[in-house]
C-alpha cells in the first residue's frame, strides 16, 4: 500500500489554516514521514525568510523596462497587417528577431536579479538566525495588568530573554510569542522562564501557575519543563498547570502532547488529560469524561501505591473509550496483572494483524 502524503496541505498547516482534525492528521504524519517533514521545513524556511525581509522599492529602471516592453507590445498589436497583406508583412517584418533578442536580454536580467535576491535572502536569514541564537528573546505582550520580566514591569510590549523569568500577579496576564512557531498565554499568578531558543529546540520552564500553548511546529520542537515532568509538544494546543507542590495537570485540546520523565512517557491526545507528581513523574493518561470511579482508582494506582486493588477498579470501570488508559497500563503493571489488562483491552480493541498476546505480554516494542 502506498503511503498517503500531505504535500498539498503543508503550506496551510504552516500558516495555521487547517481545521483542528486536519491539523492533527498532518502533525501525526509529519512525526513519522521524513519526506513530508523535509518539505515542511522548506516551507517554514521560506516563511521565515519572507517575514525577515524588509519592504523595498524596486529601482526605477525595472519599471522603465516593463513599461517599454508593454508599449512595444501594444504598438506591434496596433500595426497588425490586414489579412490580404499578411504574407508580405510577415516576410518583411523584423519584429521576430528583435523580440527574441529582447527575450534573451530579459531572461539574463531576470537570472541576475534572481541570483541577487537569493544572495540577499541568505544574508538576511543568516543574520536573523545569528541574532536569534545569540539573543534568543521572545516577544511578550501584556494582555491585562502589569506583567513583570526579571523584576521590571513591561508596558504594552516587552521581551523575554534566555534565562529571564516572566511573572504575572492576580490581576495580570501576558502572551508570549514562541519564536516563529506559536504562542503561549500566561495566566494570572504564573511564573515561567525562557530556557532555550534555537532552531532545533524551544524550551520554557513553568514553576507555578497555568499556561495555554498553541504550537504549529513539527513535533518535538517546543518543550515545557515542570517540577515533575517535561511536556513535549507534538503539534497541538493545550493547557498546563502547576500547583504549589509541583504537581502538574495537562489538558490537550488539539493534537498530542507527550509527558516524559526518566524514560517514563505518557502520550496524551486531544480530549485527554494527565497528572504528574514530583518523584513519580507522569501518571496514566485518561479522557476527561472518564467515570469518577476510574479516575479515583487511577490516582491511587499511580501515586498512592494502590496496586492490584486499585487496578481492579480501573479495569471494572473502564469503557471502550478508555483503551487509551488501558494501553498505557500494559507497561506499568507486573506480568500477572499485565495479562488481565491485555484481556480487557482486547475486548474493546482487537489486536491488529501480526500482534500476538505473547508478544504484548513480553512488552516487545513492535507489538
Image (tube, rainbow, N blue to C red):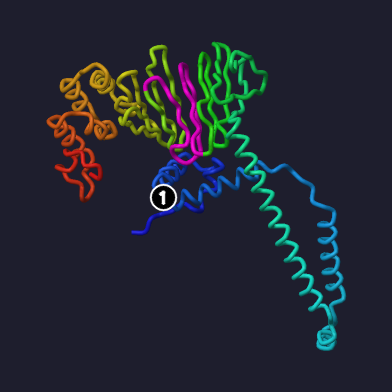
Percent x, y of residue 341: 18, 32
Q: Is residue 233 magenta?
A: no
Identify the residue at horizontal 42%, vertical 12% (top origin): 244
Q: Quadrant of residue 262?
A: top left
Q: Position of residue 192 (x, y in %)?
A: 51, 20
Q: Which residue is mark 1?
A: 33
Q: Residue 68 at what x, y percent from top left?
A: 85, 64
Q: How many numbered circles are shown?
A: 1
Q: Quadrant of residue 78?
A: bottom right
Residue 217 belongs to the span the image colors magenta: yes
Q: Look at the picture and state if 84 lies above or below 63.
A: below
Placement of the C terminus among the 4 image quadrants: top left
Which quarter of the picture shows residue 92? Answer: bottom right
Q: Is residue 135 above or below residue 69?
A: above
Q: Is residue 213 above or below residue 358?
A: above
Q: Nearer the viewer, residue 301 or 288?
A: 301
User: Quick check: 107 left or right of 217?
Assistant: right
Magenta segment main secondary structure: strand
Residue situated furthest left in the rendering = 336
Q: Is residue 10 left or right of residue 275?
A: right
Towards the viewer: 293 or 24: 24
x%, y% of residue 114? 69, 57
The N terminus, quarter of image: bottom left
Nearer-the-camera pick, 115 or 139: 115
Q: Is residue 349 left or right of residue 123?
A: left
Q: Residue at x 55, y 16 (%)?
A: 167
Left/right of residue 208 with respect to residue 268 in the rendered view: right
Number of residues whose C-alpha sits closer than 10 Å to that of mark 1, classed few (under 14), some (14–19) or many (20 or more): some
Helix, strand, or loop for circle 1? loop
Q: Residue at x 87, y 71 (%)?
A: 75
- Residue at the location (24% across, 18% down)? 300
Q: Which residues are magenta?
A: 200-228
Amino acid at each position: 500500500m502506498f503511503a498517503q502524503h500531505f504535500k498539498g496541505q503543508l503550506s496551510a498547516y504552516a500558516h495555521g489554516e487547517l481545521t483542528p482534525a486536519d491539523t492533527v492528521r498532518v502533525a501525526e504524519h509529519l512525526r513519522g514521514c521524513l519526506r513530508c517533514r523535509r518539505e515542511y521545513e522548506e516551507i517554514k524556511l521560506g516563511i521565515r525568510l519572507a517575514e525577515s525581509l524588509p519592504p523595498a522599492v524596486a529601482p526605477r529602471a525595472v519599471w522603465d523596462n516593463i513599461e517599454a516592453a508593454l508599449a512595444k507590445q501594444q504598438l506591434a498589436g496596433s500595426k497588425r497587417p490586414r489579412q490580404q497583406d499578411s504574407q508580405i508583412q510577415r516576410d518583411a517584418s523584423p519584429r521576430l528577431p528583435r523580440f527574441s533578442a529582447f527575450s534573451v536580454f530579459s531572461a539574463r536580467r531576470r537570472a541576475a536579479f534572481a541570483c541577487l535576491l537569493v544572495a540577499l535572502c541568505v544574508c538576511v536569514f543568516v543574520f536573523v538566525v545569528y541574532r536569534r541564537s545569540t539573543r534568543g528573546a521572545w516577544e511578550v505582550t501584556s494582555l491585562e495588568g502589569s506583567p513583570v520580566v526579571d523584576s521590571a514591569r513591561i508596558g504594552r510590549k516587552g521581551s523575554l530573554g534566555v534565562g529571564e523569568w516572566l511573572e504575572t500577579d492576580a490581576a495580570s496576564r501576558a502572551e508570549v510569542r514562541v519564536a516563529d512557531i506559536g504562542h503561549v498565554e500566561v495566566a494570572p499568578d504564573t511564573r515561567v522562564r525562557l530556557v532555550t531558543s534555537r532552531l532545533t529546540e524551544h524550551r520554557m520552564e513553568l514553576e507555578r501557575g497555568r499556561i495555554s500553548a498553541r504550537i504549529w511546529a513539527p513535533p518535538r520542537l517546543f518543550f515545557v519543563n515542570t517540577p515533575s515532568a517535561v511536556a513535549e509538544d507534538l503539534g497541538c494546543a493545550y493547557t498546563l498547570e502547576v500547583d504549589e507542590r509541583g504537581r502538574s495537570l495537562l489538558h490537550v485540546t488539539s493534537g498530542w502532547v507527550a509527558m516524559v520523565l526518566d524514560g517514563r512517557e505518557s502520550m496524551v491526545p486531544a480530549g485527554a488529560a494527565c497528572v504528574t507528581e514530583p518523584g513519580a513523574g507522569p501518571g496514566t493518561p485518561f479522557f476527561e469524561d472518564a467515570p469518577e470511579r476510574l479516575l479515583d482508582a487511577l490516582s491511587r494506582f499511580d501515586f498512592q501505591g494502590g496496586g492490584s486493588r486499585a487496578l481492579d477498579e480501573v479495569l471494572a470501570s473502564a469503557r471502550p473509550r478508555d483503551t487509551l488508559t488501558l494501553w498505557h497500563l500494559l507497561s506499568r503493571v507486573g506480568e500477572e496483572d499485565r495479562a488481565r489488562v491485555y484481556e480487557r483491552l482486547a475486548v474493546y480493541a482487537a489486536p491488529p494483524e501480526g500482534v500476538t498476546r505473547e508478544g504484548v505480554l513480553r512488552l516487545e516494542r513492535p507489538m
